[in-house]
Image (cartoon, rainbow, N blue to C red):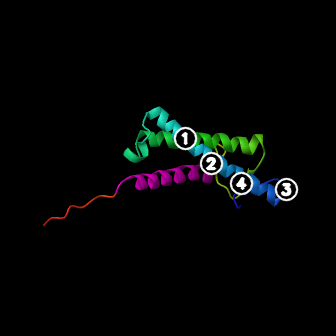
Amino acid sequence: MPWFVFAESSSLKEMNWMCTQASAGDVVMLWLAYLTAVWLNRQPGWIRNEPFGLAFLVFILVAQALNFVMEGINRYWLDRWQYAETMWVIPALDLGVFPVLQWFLIPSLLVLLIHKMLTPPATTIERD
C-alpha cells in the first residue's frame, strides 16, 4: 500500500487483518452516517426522493467526522498505521488527502447508485 506504513514488526497476516477490520469499520461508519441523516431529517427515503439535498449533506459530514475520528484512533491511539511520505496530508487536520477524498467519493457514488436502483424507469407513452 503506497500511502500507508505499518509497524515493521507487523506480519502480512496482521496487516491484512487490520485492513479487513478497517473495511468492516467503513461499512459501520456508512451505516451510522445514513442513520444519522435519516434521524436528523426524518426522511427514511431521502436517497430515493431527494438524493442530494440536506440529508445528503448530513450524510457526508457525519461520514467525514467519523473518518477523522477513526483515522486519529488508528494512527495515534492504536498505532495501527502511519502515512507514507507519498501521502499528501492536510496540515490543519493532519489527515491524509486520500482518506478524505475516499469518504466523499464512495458515499456520493453509493447514494447515486442506490438512487438509480430505487427510481423506477421512466415510461414512455406510445401515441397512435
Q: Which residue is mark 2?
A: 26
Q: Residue at x 46, y 41 (%)?
A: 57
Q: Residue at x 76, y 40 (%)?
A: 77
Residue 56 location in percent, x, y?
A: 45, 43
- Which amino acid does the dot numbered 4 rest on? Cys
Q: Secondary structure at mark 4?
A: helix
Q: CA distance from mark 3 to mark 2?
A: 25 Å
Q: Which residue is mark 1?
A: 33
- Which amino acid does the dot numbered 3 rest on? Glu
Q: Quadrant of the N terminus?
A: bottom right
The magenta stretch spans which residues? 97-120
Question: Which numbered tag is attached to residue 8?
Answer: 3
Toward which corner of the image does residue 4 lie, by quadrant? bottom right
Q: Which residue is mark 4?
A: 19
75 or 122: nearer the viewer = 122
- Which amino acid does the dot numbered 2 rest on? Asp
Sequence-first disc among 3 and 4: 3
Instruction: Tell me if 106 is positioned left or right of 67 in this view.
Output: left
> Can I make out residue 77 in this image?
yes
Residue 31 location in percent, x, y?
A: 56, 43
127 or 39: nearer the viewer = 127
Say whether marks 4 and 1 touch (CB < 8 Å): no
